[in-house]
Image (spheres, rainbow, N blue to C red):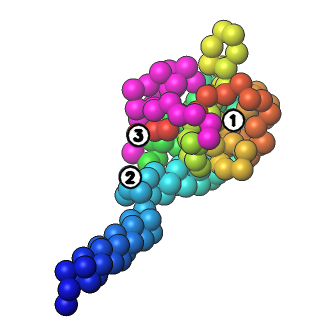
Amino acid sequence: MTTSIRRTLARALTLVAALLTLTTLVSMPVSSAEASTATFGDRISYTASTRKGSPYQYGADGPTRFDCSGLTKWTLAKLGRSLPHSAAGQYNDSDVHHIISRWRHKGDLVFFHNSRGIYHVGIYAGNGYIWHAPYSGARVRLEKLWTSSVYYGRVK
């Protein structure tokens, strides 16, 4: 075999090996952390959904009555995480990683804000909906987001 044929064959084999490696990398999940985040987020959303219909009560954190931060606190506690009992406290908690809206997933916390700060929190359920305990006289429910004045946080 001539030297030029060997070089051409070596280049072709290198190209095939590179393509196989690239195909394998593309088909693999980016990280197991991302996969477990999605699973954990589904569990958060599901756990919140089990409280559907529970009455709102200011200062309550379950298991049968909730205010907004009480619902998020109770939900995360059922899954082994600890959060303070206030929307602003949860937003500022070191276990809550702030994320931008396009990175939101089921189970992320949704923090409502205005010029005075954080005033409400819910749990993202996907497709623009949240689980939350809205106000006195209402019950825990799934509701379409009604404002863009929100921040998102993911519990680590």
Of callouts 2 and 1, the N-terminal one? 2
Q: Disc 2 vs disc 1: Cβ atoms closer than 8 Å? A: no
| Label 2, label 3: how far apart the Cα atoms are | 11 Å
* Disc 2: which residue: 33
Indicate the amino acid at tag 1: Ala
Foreground pick, 50 / 111 = 111
Name the residue beneath numbered marker 1: 133
Q: Position of residue 21 (x, y in %)?
A: 34, 70
Q: Residue at x 59, y 54 (%)?
A: 46
Residue type pointed to by label 3: Lys
Residue 101 lies left or right of residue 18; in this view the side is: right
Of residues 20 and 84, which is closer to you in this image?
20
Real-space CA distance between mark 2 and mark 1, rounded to the nearest whole angstrom? 30 Å
* Residue at which label 3 appears: 156
Disc 2 is placed on an element classified as: helix
88 part of magenta stretch? yes
Q: Does the magenta stretch include residue 133?
A: no
Question: For the residue carrying disc 1, how many other residues have a C-alpha within 10 Å: few (<14), some (14-19), or many (20+)?
Answer: many
Vertical comparison of 115 with 120: above or below: above
Image spot of residue 124 (x, y percent): 63, 43
Sort mark 2 into few (<14), some (14-19) or many (20+) by Cα contacts within 10 Å.
few
Front residue (pair 92, 82): 92
Q: In this picture, which residue range is highlighted in magenta? A: 80-102
Which residue type carries mark 2? Ala
